[in-house]
Every structure is written in structure tokens, then in C-alpha cells.
């Protein structure tokens, strides 16, 4: 306990909070609040008191035997810590959890944490950037990314943001990715977005080169100093207060405020819909490009709008259409296609509008249009269709009038 208190006294950057922090730790220790057998519980109780008094998300104690061991490796602590961080970067692909092409050629990257290894991470970031810059628009998903290395955040900023239009001659701006100039960029955040992840979003927002979508972030801006605490703990304590050169402040305690506020679960479809709408509004599009963007726009827009279909209509939609069956169960419509037994069956349809048009998840780019007399399947566009008349259910391939290709 004395080492924790001494470290806070010597290095904690918010000096006017030090006395209150020390008083709480001292009194709680004297009262036996920290007298627990579990190391994890000991760290949790210390951290609760530290954050309660300081309101600083970077002031905490963590049980971390691997990092502690690396930091206390007598003559080779730097090498041991570097080896540990490289191992973590390799195992997590430097935190890059997902790369995906969304409809409309919107490229998505999901980053779960900012891991850093000087030998590994720049290559991982470069590989991701090569994929992402080929998109017509970009979405960087930082929801529930608690942060990590500021070096990793700086590396990714260079590769995934265009030059800073507010400071075009700065060294930082000249290192940016010029292939991203003019492309819509969106960054997703929520209350679980912290530290280095917030730094990425805050910088992008300050430069006005990206739209921030979601909920306000956690609010942990200060730079951190890590100290090993015997026998297996690491103390994190804020040691520096960063100031953004554009805003003259930071996001400590208040978080990054989104430009487009939506619930966390709707952040991705909201960003996707906004990206497609911007692309569809560009001048000079060919008729084919405009149609493709409009086709891609409907699903995320419907999800954000939370389109629902009245129960009376759902009941009327259910029935048999040759090899297609729509079953009503628990108020929801389920799609099956009996002539394609290896494809997904009993798929819950997602309404695109209140007039009988649905998505069929599990089928690539399929729309289902239900009418009183039959059902139309649209494959990738409204021109490639299959039509099935309402009637009795068939078990084989019959009853369909085809145009284009079938599943």
C-alpha cells in the first residue's frame, strides 16, 4: 500500500486531487477494506476507490502477472516488456478484429484494442489500410475499444485519415494517406470507447475529416505511467495531460461527443446508411452506379428506422408459394425454400418497409417482396427476379417463373 501511495504522490499529474486520494487509501486500508485473499478483488477494491475520488479512468490497479514479471526483469526489463507486447500484438492481429466489405463498397474495420509492437503493428496497419482505401467509404468501429497504445493510435491515424485540412503543412498532415481525400469516413464510438481509441476519434473530429457516430465515449484522455507493484500488480496513473492543438483542450471526463447520436447497437447501420446516401448524392454517377447505391441504401436505413409490419399484414403474408414457404411464428415471418435444401431454412425475414418487402439474412443480397397474389425474389437488383404464385406448397423445383438467376 505504501508503494501505491508513494507513486501517486510523486507522479500523479492532477496534484490538487492527490491529498484526497491518499486520505481514502489510508483510511480504507486502516479499516480493513482491502484485507481480502483474492488478488483480483484486492485490485478491484483499490481501483474503485481510486476512480471514485479522482474521477480519472486512467488511475487504477490491475492484477497482471505477465506484465509485472516483464517489468521487473532485472537487467532486461525493456526487452522482456517488448517481447510481451509483441506476443499480444501477434495474438490479436494488433487489435484488428474484423475487415469487411459492406454493400455499396463501404469498407469496415473493427478494432477491439490498440495493441503495439514496433516490429509487427506497422505491417498489420499497412495491410488493413491497403484493404480499406479501396472502399468508396470507410467505417472504423471503435465501440467497446478501451484503448491501449498511443503509438498504435498515431500509426493508424497516419494510415486511415487524409491530410489535415486545417493544418495542411504540419508534419503530421504530410504523413497522412492522400488516397483518402474526399472519401466519407465514419468512426463508431460508445461508452466503452476509451483512452487511445478516444484519441483517434477526437483527432478525426477536430480535423473535420470524419463523422463520429454513436454514443459519448468514456472520457479518459490523460497519458499513463505504469508501475509494477509486488507481488503481481501494475498501477496505472495519469502522468501527463494532452492538449489538442486544434481545440486547445481534450476529452478528459466528458468523452468524445458524436456528430450523429444513435444508440450503440444502431451505430453501424446508421453510419452505413449515411455513407451510402453521401455516395449516392455525388454528381456524375452512371445510372448503374446510382441504382447500386440505392439498392445498398435500403437495408441499413430500414434497420435504423426500426421498420415494423402490422400483425394483420404479417398474417396475410404467411402462406405457400410453390417451393417457397412463409411461416408465421411468434408474430414473425420465417422464409424457407424447399428446392434448395442446403441453403438456410426457417430464416427470419427483416422488414425493409411496411408494404411487404423484406431482407432474408443468410441469403446473399436477396430481397423478398410479398403481395396478395404471389412472392417475388430479387437477387442483387430489381431486375434479376424470380416470381412464385400463391398456392399450395411444393417440395420440389416447380411453380416458379424465373428471370435472371436462381439461388
Image: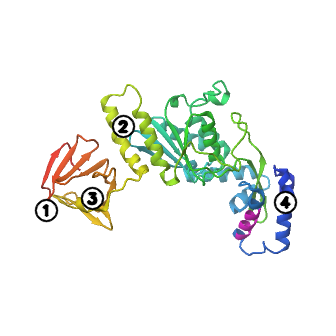
Q: Nearer the viewer, mark 2 or mark 3?
A: 3
Residue identifier under label 2: 293
Gap in angstroms between the C-alphas marked 2 and 3: 29 Å
First in sequence, mark 4 or 3: give its number.
4
Q: Nearer the viewer, mark 4 or mark 3?
A: 3
- Where residue 305 appears, x then y in whole percent? 42, 50
Q: Which mark is residue 20?
A: 4
Q: Secondary structure at mark 3?
A: helix
Residue identifier under label 3: 313
Q: Nearer the viewer, residue 195 or 262?
A: 262
First in sequence, mark 2 or 3: give its number.
2
Q: Which mark is residue 337?
A: none
Estimate how packed mark 3 is, as few (under 14), some (14 to 19) or many (20 or more) residues with alpha carbons within 10 Å. Answer: few
Q: Is residue 159 left or right of residue 83?
A: left
- Where residue 397 appears, x then y in whole percent? 14, 56
Residue identifier under label 1: 392
Estimate how packed mark 4 is, as few (under 14), some (14 to 19) or many (20 or more) residues with alpha carbons within 10 Å. Answer: few
Gap in angstroms between the C-alphas marked 1 and 3: 20 Å
For the magenta stretch, what is the residue range? Answer: 41-49
First in sequence, mark 2 or 1: give its number.
2
Question: Pointer 4 and pointer 2: residues touching (CB < 8 Å)?
Answer: no
Chief secondary structure of the magenta portion: helix
Q: Nearer the viewer, mark 1 or mark 3?
A: 3
Q: Is residue 206 visible?
A: yes
The relative height of residue 59 versus residue 277 in the rendered view (above or below) is below
The relative height of residue 77 versus residue 22 in the rendered view (above or below) is above
- Where residue 364 appears, x then y in whole percent? 31, 49
Question: Pointer 2 and pointer 1: residues touching (CB < 8 Å)?
Answer: no
Does the magenta run of residues contain 66? Answer: no
Estimate how packed mark 2 is, as few (under 14), some (14 to 19) or many (20 or more) residues with alpha carbons within 10 Å. Answer: many
Estimate how packed mark 1 is, as few (under 14), some (14 to 19) or many (20 or more) residues with alpha carbons within 10 Å. Answer: some
Q: Secondary structure at mark 4?
A: helix
Amino acid at each position: 500500500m505504501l508503494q501505491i501511495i508513494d507513486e501517486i504522490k510523486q507522479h500523479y499529474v492532477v496534484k490538487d486531487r492527490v491529498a484526497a486520494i491518499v486520505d481514502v487509501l489510508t483510511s480504507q486500508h486502516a479499516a480493513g477494506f482491502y484485507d481480502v485473499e483474492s488478488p483480483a478483488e484486492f485490485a478491484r477494491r483499490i481501483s474503485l476507490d481510486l476512480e471514485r475520488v479522482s474521477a480519472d479512468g486512467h488511475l487504477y490497479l490491475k492484477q497482471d502477472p505477465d506484465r509485472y514479471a516483464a517489468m521487473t526483469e532485472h537487467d532486461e526489463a525493456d526487452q522482456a516488456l517488448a517481447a510481451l507486447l509483441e506476443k499480444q500484438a501477434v495474438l490479436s492481429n494488433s487489435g484488428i478484429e474484423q475487415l469487411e466489405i459492406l454493400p455499396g463498397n463501404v469498407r469496415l474495420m473493427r478494432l477491439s484494442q490498440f495493441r503495439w509492437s514496433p516490429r509487427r503493428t506497422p505491417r498489420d496497419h499497412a495491410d488493413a489500410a491497403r484493404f480499406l482505401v479501396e472502399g468508396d467509404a470507410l467505417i472504423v468501429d471503435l465501440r467497446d475499444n478501451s484503448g491501449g497504445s498511443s503509438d498504435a493510435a498515431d500509426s493508424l491515424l497516419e494510415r486511415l485519415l487524409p491530410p489535415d485540412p486545417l493544418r495542411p503543412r504540419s508534419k503530421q498532415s504530410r504523413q497522412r494517406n492522400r488516397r483518402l481525400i474526399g472519401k466519407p469516413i465514419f468512426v463508431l464510438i460508445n461508452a466503452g470507447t476509451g483512452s487511445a481509441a478516444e484519441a483517434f476519434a477526437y483527432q478525426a473530429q477536430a480535423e473535420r475529416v470524419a463523422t463520429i457516430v454513436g454514443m459519448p465515449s468514456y472520457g479518459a484522455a490523460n497519458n499513463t505511467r505504469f508501475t509494477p507493484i509486488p507481488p503481481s500488480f501494475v498501477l496505472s496513473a495519469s502522468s501527463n495531460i494532452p492538449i489538442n492543438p486544434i481545440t486547445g483542450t481534450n476529452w478528459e471526463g466528458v468523452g468524445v461527443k458524436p456528430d450523429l447520436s444513435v444508440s450503440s447497437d444502431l451505430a453501424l447501420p446508421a453510419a452505413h446508411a449515411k455513407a451510402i446516401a453521401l455516395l449516392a448524392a455525388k454528381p456524375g454517377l452512371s445510372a448503374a452506379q446510382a441504382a447500386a447505391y440505392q439498392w445498398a441504401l435500403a437495408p441499413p436505413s430500414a434497420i435504423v428506422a426500426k421498420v415494423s409490419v402490422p400483425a394483420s399484414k404479417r398474417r396475410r403474408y404467411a402462406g405457400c408459394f410453390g417451393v417457397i414457404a412463409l411461416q408465421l411464428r411468434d408474430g414473425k415471418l420465417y422464409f424457407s425454400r424447399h428446392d434448395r435444401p442446403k441453403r438456410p431454412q426457417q430464416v427470419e425475414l427483416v422488414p425493409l418497409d411496411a408494404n411487404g418487402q423484406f431482407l432474408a439474412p443468410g441469403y446473399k443480397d436477396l430481397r423478398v417482396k410479398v403481395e396478395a397474389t404471389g412472392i417475388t425474389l430479387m437477387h442483387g437488383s430489381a431486375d434479376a427476379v424470380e416470381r412464385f404464385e400463391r398456392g399450395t406448397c411444393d417440395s420440389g423445383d416447380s411453380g416458379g417463373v424465373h428471370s435472371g438467376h436462381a439461388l
